[in-house]
Image (cartoon, rainbow, N blue to C red):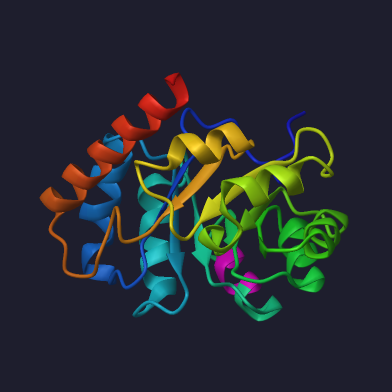
Amino acid sequence: MTDPTRWPDLNRGLVAILRGITPADADAVSDVLIEEGFEALEVPLNSPDPLATIGAMVRRHGHHALIGGGTMLTTGQVEQVADLGGRLMVSPNMRPAVIALAVARGMVTMPGVLTPTEAFDALDAGAAGLKIFPASLMGAGGIAALMAVLPKGTVVGAVGGVTPENMGDYIRAGVTTFGMGTAVYRPGDSAGQVRAKARALVAAYDRAMAG
């Protein structure tokens, strides 16, 4: 039986970070992202009315996409998102109690880490993957050095400073997942703008993986 708290085998390791999205845009934006090949959508909890947005996206796409919250800092926030059916817990920091509760609620977890100590503590707490944040601070070389001591098969994502031009460097370092924020969505973007951005990012990811 597949463990629902493990990082899933996505066709592409791309997570759309929809910071600032409103419930009014939830359906249209999530539709075009799914259509263009994104399979994981994250609504940061410092967005306007994030729970309503997450709930709408879960009802629409939760049966075939990984949808949940970002900037999840407390156990109470984990409970709120899990109660809506959200299955993804992403945070900029690493709190063992938050990770452990999310795992207990059946969520896929990717907490933010930047040091070996944080990385191993997150894995000990049950994290499905590690979000190197901000990735630009460590760079591809720093991530490669960290990955040399992590358990084989650890899922590592890069967020912050990732561009289509440097994706290949991070992939060669061992990164398998990328959180894309303003490169895919800015508050006020139309569905057409989001579609164009998503299509360009998917193409860049495919080129980087092939190269």
Please say whether residue 171 is visible from this viewpoint.
Answer: yes
In percent of the image, x 50 and y 38: which residue is there?
169
* Magenta highlight on residue 119: no
Quarter location, residue 198: top left
Name above or below for residue 34 compared with residue 143: above
In percent of the image, x 30 and y 51: which residue is there?
30
> Which residue is farthest right?
124
- Quadrant location of the C terminus? top left
Between 4 and 156, the residue placed more toward the observer is: 156
Q: Is residue 97 left or right of residue 164?
A: right
Quarter location, residue 56: bottom left
In percent of the image, x 33 and y 34: which residue is there?
204
- Quadrant location of the N terminus? top right
Q: Which residues are magenta?
A: 78-83
Estimate the x, y position of residue 106 in percent, counting from the top left.
70, 52
Estimate the x, y position of residue 48 in percent, counting from the top left.
34, 80
Q: Is residue 112 left or right of residue 55?
A: right
Name above or below for residue 162 compared with residue 64: below
Q: Main secondary structure of the magenta part?
A: helix
Between 164 and 30, the residue placed more toward the observer is: 164
Estimate the x, y position of residue 10 in percent, counting from the top left.
52, 32
